[in-house]
Image (cartoon, rainbow, N blue to C red):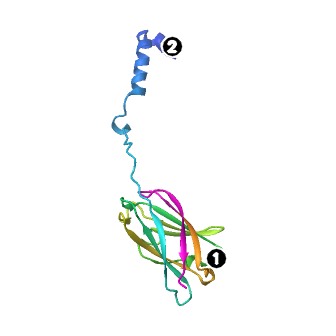
Amino acid sequence: MIVALAAIVGTWFVALAPIVAGLFLLAPPIGIYKHDETPVVRTGVRLDASALDDQPDHTLRFRLTLVNPGAVAADNFRIRLLVPHTLVPAQAANRLLGPILIGAMGQNWFVDTAYDATAITFRAGQSDTISCPPGGRLDLADLNLPVQARPFDITLEYQVSGGSAAPALDRLRLRAID
């Protein structure tokens, strides 16, 4: 192709083409093509649950708390907690989430049921001011488990991702008050 263009434009193009191509390929990025390669500082967060007193309908209640042991504030993150249907049937999933202490249902909190589990998702979006300070704790909501979920030692799986929170898969251990 260079030889064909040289026949049309002139022989000086053969000598100039590799230099122009090299400038385009090896030149440093400028303007809008320049991007920051600085890594994002992330913090490791985890969920904690503390048992609350039983409700009059014998529902087990747990307070879900976000713990941030790191030196960076956790914001713009997502938490997805899975509750198996063997523990809470699908028809009871609408009462699974008790009082919400931070955020709003449909904006920050979502409850989805699937074939074998119910997923509770919490999103601390960019437009919200939801943030967990460095070395702090943030009470999120209450988790209600029905009376048929009466084992005193329950383990649920959850996922943390996005924002300044380091991605993690972990387990949340729930222990009811005897």
Image spot of residue 118 (x, y percent): 59, 70
Q: What residue type is labelled 2?
A: Ala
Q: How far apart are marks 2 and 1 (CA)?
A: 73 Å
Q: Say how many tags the image has.
A: 2
Residue at image location 55% in from the left, 82% down from the top: 60
Q: Is residue 174 magenta?
A: yes
Residue at image location 58% in from the left, 76% down from the top: 153
Which of pointers 2 and 1 indicates the residue nearer the eye? 1
User: Label 1 near label 2: C-beta < 8 Å?
Assistant: no
Label for residue 18? Answer: none
- Quarter of the image where the C terminus is located: bottom right
Q: Is residue 43 above or below residue 138?
A: above
Which of the 4 quarters of the picture holds residue 135?
bottom left
Q: Does the magenta stretch include residue 93?
A: no
For numbered disc 1, what is the local secondary structure? loop
Q: Label 1: which residue?
A: 89
Say whether residue 59 is left or right of residue 28.
right
Q: Which of 156 and 10 is in front in this view?
A: 156
Image spot of residue 96 (x, y percent): 55, 77
Q: In this view, does 1 lie above or below 91?
A: above
Task: Read off the magenta span.
Answer: 159-178
2 or 1: tag closer to the N-terminus:
2
User: Label 2 crowding class (10 Å Cα cut-off): few <14, some 14-19, many 20+?
Assistant: few
Image spot of residue 70 (x, y percent): 39, 60
User: Label 1 crowding class (10 Å Cα cut-off): few <14, some 14-19, many 20+?
Assistant: some
Which of the 4 quarters of the picture holds residue 146?
bottom right
Q: Which amino acid does label 1 sit on?
A: Pro
Image spot of residue 162 (x, y percent): 46, 57
Label for residue 4? Answer: 2
Q: Is residue 72 above or below residue 62?
A: above
For numbered disc 2, what is the local secondary structure? helix
- Farthest residue in the bottom direction? 56
